[in-house]
Image (cartoon, rainbow, N blue to C red):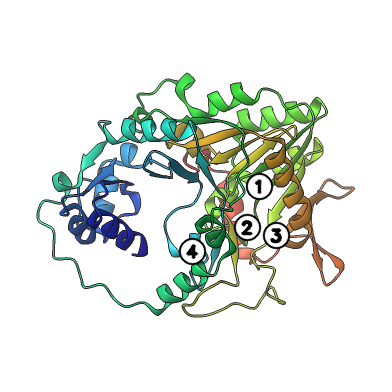
Amino acid sequence: MLMFNALRKAAERGVRVRLLLDDNNTGGLDAILATLDAHPQIEVRLFNPNGIRSMRTLGLVADFWRLNRRMHNKSFTADNKVTIIGGRNVGDEYFGAAGDISFADLDVIAAGPVVKAVSDDFDRYWNSPSAYPLALMVTDPEPAPPAAVDPDAKAYLDAIQQSAFLQQMLGGTLQLEWAHARFLSDDPAKVLDKSTPDANIATRLKALFGQPERNLDLVSPYFVPGEDGAAAVLEIAKKGAKIRILTNSLEATDVAAVHAGYAKWRKPLLEAGVELYELRRASTDEPSREKKRSGAGFGSSDASLHAKTFGVDGNRIFVGSFNFDQRSIHLNTEMGMVIDSVELADRLSKTLDRTLPMRAYEVLLDEKGNVYWVEGRDGKLVRHDVEPGTTWLKRAAVNGLSWLPIDWLL
């Protein structure tokens, strides 16, 4: 709601606002979006929309092969001068403003020539056959409900006003890393299964990064490599590069089914020397893993990984929406930037060095080839022989899912 309000205020200043939303998560927003769209300076379009607005589940079932695909891209571009891209969705939990769980995320703010590439790509999606003007989909909108006064919104805005980042940006002292950046995105025709494999971001990323020679740091909340991806990682490890992967643990993931597509690859990756880490659910400012904060409020006691990034050979990184999973590779459209920067690659590596012992389980193999987990707690190492923080029922369900041929959906 804060974002919608900011867009409305911008429009009242005379700014032309275009809002392109993937329709997957717009349930219940039709009236509010229609109110925005009615402003002469604001235009809203829905990408790959559900044609049945009131019974969306029925629409999904009736047109599953199309609606199962998503525009997963995230970008915010102002005046063709500055852009923000990354993995963050617009929702309370993605900005540390939800009371139950907070997603650890990553974005990049960029200026310079790469901004035009992002802006041109927005035009490509905006004008694609899958982008429908809201007025075509919402023909008789209900009046938008009155905006509720949310005390959490004020707390969030107060925190933002006091943030060092905002003060540096307003004061013109924000330190930027000047580096060569290349923008990549999928063809919007991918959601219609009409793009060519060579145009997909996964293929182009592989061509850009080539074969890592020294090290690969990979961060992905949903790590489902599949046979081809696992083979590629194993080949890199076989040639001597150090590989470190951070993903969600079963207790931290918000999509347990995805864990089924990942868990089956743990043992072969570990046997090849890959270092595996899984983010713990409890955040570092909680003294107890079992302690949970209840009710709404600013901040969270539970954390889940949502950032998507990787660094190669200490000299270049990728930041974007692309998960190392089958959905990102084959079904969804994705975007991101490849940045040639020793500084940023080094920062990613050192951040992992510093935070993994505090925030993640290290996954290891014992002498019998069994997987176990180690966490640092109160200065000691604690070993877990089953998935930590989970019930036997949840583990059994995930194990059952791992036998099903559903990786292409994950």
Instruction: Residue 148: give x, y in percent of width and height.
Output: 29, 76
Give how far across and how far down residue 112 sits, in percent: 50, 35
* Residue drawn at 80 percent across, 30 percent down: 214
Do labels 4 and 1 touch, CB within 8 Å? no
State how far apart marks 3 and 4 are (Cα): 25 Å
Mark closer to the chain start, 4 or 1: 4
Helix or strand or loop: what does disc 2 sit on?
loop
Q: Which mark is residue 42?
A: none
CA gap, disc 1 to disc 3? 10 Å
CA gap between label 4 and label 1 equals 26 Å
Foreground of the two, 73 or 332: 73
Crowdedness near tag 3: few (<14), some (14–19) or many (≥20) residues, C-alpha within 10 Å? some
Q: Quadrant of residue 380?
A: bottom right
Q: Which residue is mark 4?
A: 93
Say which of 99 and 7 sits in front. 7
Q: Tell me the residue that label 2 is attached to.
A: 250
**Residue 238: percent from left, percent from top:** 80, 27
Secondary structure type for disc 3:
loop
Are the residues at dot 2 and dot 1 in contact (C-beta closer than 8 Å)? Answer: yes
Q: In this figure, which residue is indicated by the disc labeled 3?
A: 387
Q: Amino acid at mark 4?
A: Glu
Between the residue at mark 3 and the residue at mark 2, the CA separation in whole angstroms equals: 7 Å
Sequence-wise, which precedes: disc 3 or disc 4? Answer: 4
